[in-house]
Image: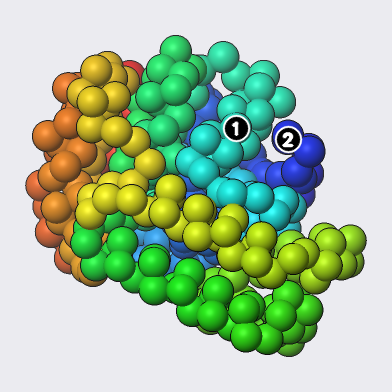
Amino acid sequence: MPVIEIDGITTRYETVGGGPPLLMFSPGGFDSTLENWTTFGRYRDLGFVDALKDSYTCVVFDRRESGQSGGRVERLTWDRYVTQALGLIDHLGYDTVHTMGGCVGCSTAAALAVQHPERVRSMVLFSPAGGPQYRMGQHHRFTQHLAFAMEHGMQAVVELARSSTAGFSKDPRVGPWAAPLRSSEEFAAAYAAMDVKKYELMVSGTVRGLFDRDTVPGVEAEDLMTLHVPGLIVPGQDSSHAPSAARYLEECLPVHEYWDVPVVEQTAETAPARIRAFLEQH
């Protein structure tokens, strides 16, 4: 698969199919790899890429710090994820794209539309991550990681990450930089040499900035309320994808469709067809 450099960080991506571009922000939290569209949880059964590739050029990619994309040890923000997405669009030569986010990918999709509405034709927000339990879970995960790093040191984090394939979601101790720790000797050496106190401040700032509300993180309500990019909102139904998160987007977005269908009725037959019908309007 092709790899490009965006903002000094490598991004692995793939284009599948043909037609208008559909930039797809993967589900999976801090393990948001392009394979997640076909292998992760319910997305494995929904088959979005296969269902949409005949009509759209599906652009899938590893989010920075995930899969085979690179990373940088810095305070992570939604703006940095937008920078990666915009760089990929520019590299591929697209003036405008449709977008689709799954899970936490919805936050970056919405943030891209807010910052660069002229580049986004429409956005599909499928099972947006959010809700009070989601926020609390993310903060707890970072607390566990920092506790391990502070007690055992940075080199111990490197060794732990390299001793398994578990990502941050499954083993919080390895932290959000587990993937590049495994793939790059240079990155791992620089990470191990970091001052743990400075690292604590950076990580604390990351979690506070990324997950600062009990609904969909990443975008302010006032910005969504003045956004005229059309959106299709599809609700989730669990502690990480609270129905309240989808309803928040419904309340804030002036131009939207809300697919009010329970998760059990969002199937490989119904969900891609509903998304295709929405995209064809825009």
Q: Which residue is mark 2?
A: 6
Residues at badges 1 and 2 in contact (C-beta under 8 Å)? yes
- Front residue of 109/280: it is 109
Q: Is residue 175 left or right of residue 163?
A: left
Residue that lies at the very extreme toward the front in this rendered image: 197
Count numbered badges in the picture: 2
Residue 204 visible in this rendered orientation of the protein: yes
Q: What's the mark number on residue 96?
A: none
Residue on which disc 1 sits = 83
Q: Is residue 167 visible?
A: no
Residue 231 on image: x %, y %: 27, 30
Q: Amino acid at mark 2?
A: Ile
Identified by mark 1, the residue type is Thr
Check the picture and name the quadrant holding the C terminus: top left
202 lies above or below 2? below
Residue placed most toward the observer, 281 or 239: 239
The residue positioned 66% from the left and 44% from the top of the image is 14
In this picture, residue 205 sits left or right of residue 239: right
Give the mark nearer the N terminus: 1 vs 2: 2
For residue 131, what is the image quadrant?
A: bottom left
Mark 1 packing: few (<14 Cα in 10 Å), some, or many (20+)? some
Residue 135 in the image, given as x and y percentages of width and height: 31, 61
